[in-house]
Image: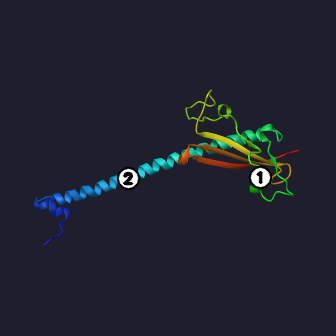
Amino acid sequence: MVTSRSIKQVFNNGNGFTIIEVLIAIGILSIGILGMATMQISSIRGNNTAGKLTSNSIWAINRIEKIIALDYDDAELTGSVYDHDTDTSLSAHLAANVGVGLHQNPVSSDGLDNNSDGQIDETGETGAMTMQWQVVDDYPILDSKWIQITVSKGTGLAQKTVSIIYYKINTI
């Protein structure tokens, strides 16, 4: 007949634990430790993704601040012209004007640390970070510009992209 024993009974009678009880306890402990290790790996991956998205957001906001400082008619803000009479939507306008108003600085002068080596815009720089901005004039109203800044970092499935839309108004 099998009876359950408390820890106090085990230590009082001097018999100790059986080898099976010890092996089961070690198995349960090892499963718990492996589970914690898996959680740590997932946490590290999540923090890496958050870091990339934060970095991309900071670069996009930096570009917005530079755009705010530019004149309304600056060459970096030329874009396709939205026709309120014929264009049915912004997405249709962008599809009909692919590449028009799309700006991207060369990698060696884009203000980014494209290869994450701590140096910004060094000679011969290449890397996985890119920034571009699309400009549409007279959208959503006349004398305004719709500007979408897109920053991407990484390659393949690890690529993380942030897009921010900014509106610039032609002030008098």
- Please name the residue shown 33% across and 56% down the image: 32
Helix, strand or loop at mark 2: helix
Hey, what amino acid is under mark 1? Ala
Q: Residues within 10 Å of mark 1 (few under 14, many from 20)?
A: few
| Amino acid identity at mark 2 | Met
> Which residue is tagged 2?
36
Q: Which residue is drawn at 69% across and 42% down?
A: 132
Q: Indicate the colouring scheme.
A: rainbow
N-terminal-most mark, 1 or 2: 2
> In the picture, which quadrant includes the C terminus?
top right
Mark 1 and mark 2 residues within 8 Å of each other at the beta carbon: no
Res 22 quadrant in image:
bottom left
Q: In the image, 115: left or right of 1?
A: right
In the rendered structure, find residue 96 and report the number of the disc placed on it: 1
Residue placed most toward the observer, 91 or 51: 91
Residue 137: image location, x then y, percent: 82, 48
Residue at horizontal 80%, vertical 37%? Answer: 75
Q: Quadrant of residue 63?
A: top right
In the depicted structure, whether residue 87 falls above or below residue 150: below
Q: Which of 10 and 76 is in front in this view?
A: 76
Q: Residue furthest left?
A: 14
Secondary structure found at label 1: helix
Residues under labels 1 and 2: Cα distance?
Answer: 52 Å
Closest to the camera, between mark 1 and mark 2, is 1
Q: Residue 26's x, y, as percent? A: 25, 55
The location of residue 160, given as percent across then percent down, is 58, 47
